[in-house]
């Protein structure tokens, strides 16, 4: 079984060294902090794709509004011409 290109003996050595450096009381805190960091990174990467989807939806809505706005002036040309008042001499 290989994790990140390392086998079980290498992972046990790394765990033993971490235990010696940080001590048995701080090792669970270190693991918890590492887990939170990984979770935040995954959420951050997921939010990037959600933001892209939101931008694409906004662009589509704006394009639809522009198409509707282009159609409306053609429909409004049916109005009557304004009346002229006053006389010129």
Image (cartoon, rainbow, N blue to C red):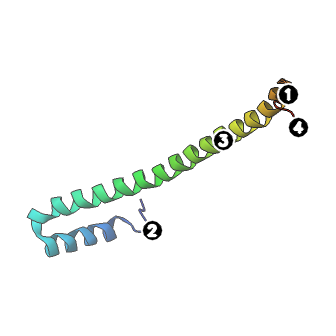
Q: Nearer the viewer, residue 27 or 50?
A: 50
- Whichever of labels 3 and 4 marks the residue nearer the N terminus, that label is 3
Label 3 SS:
helix
The nearer-to-camera label among 1 and 2 is 1
Question: Which residue is denoted by mark 4 in the rendering?
Answer: 88
Q: Quadrant of residue 11?
A: bottom left
Q: CA distance from mark 2 to mark 4?
A: 95 Å
Question: Which residue is denoted by mark 3 in the rendering?
Answer: 62
Tell me where residue 82 appears, x and y as whole percent.
82, 28
Q: Quadrant of the N terminus?
A: bottom left
Question: Which residue is denoted by mark 1 in the rendering?
Answer: 81
Report crowding for label 4: few under 14, some 14 to 19, many 20 or more residues within 10 A (C-alpha).
Answer: few
Q: CA distance from mark 4 to mark 1?
A: 20 Å
- Whichever of labels 4 and 1 marks the residue nearer the N terminus, that label is 1
The nearer-to-camera label among 2 and 4 is 4
Instruction: Specify whether 40 is left or right of 25.
Output: right
Residue furthest out toward the front: 89
Instruction: Specify whether 68 is left or right of 39.
Output: right
- Whichever of labels 1 and 2 marks the residue nearer the N terminus, that label is 2
**Mark drawn on residue 5:** 2
**Residue at image point 57% right, 45% down:** 53
């Amino acid at each position: 079984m290989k994790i990140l290109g390392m086998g079980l003996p290498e992972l046990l050595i790394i765990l033993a060294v971490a235990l010696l450096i940080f001590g048995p009381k701080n090792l669970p805190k270190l693991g918890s902090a590492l887990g939170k960091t990984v979770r935040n990174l995954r959420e951050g990467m997921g939010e990037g794709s959600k933001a892209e989807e939101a931008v694409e939806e906004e662009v589509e809505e704006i394009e639809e509004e522009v198409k509707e706005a282009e159609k409306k002036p053609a429909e409004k040309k049916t109005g009557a011409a304004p009346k002229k008042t006053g006389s010129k001499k």
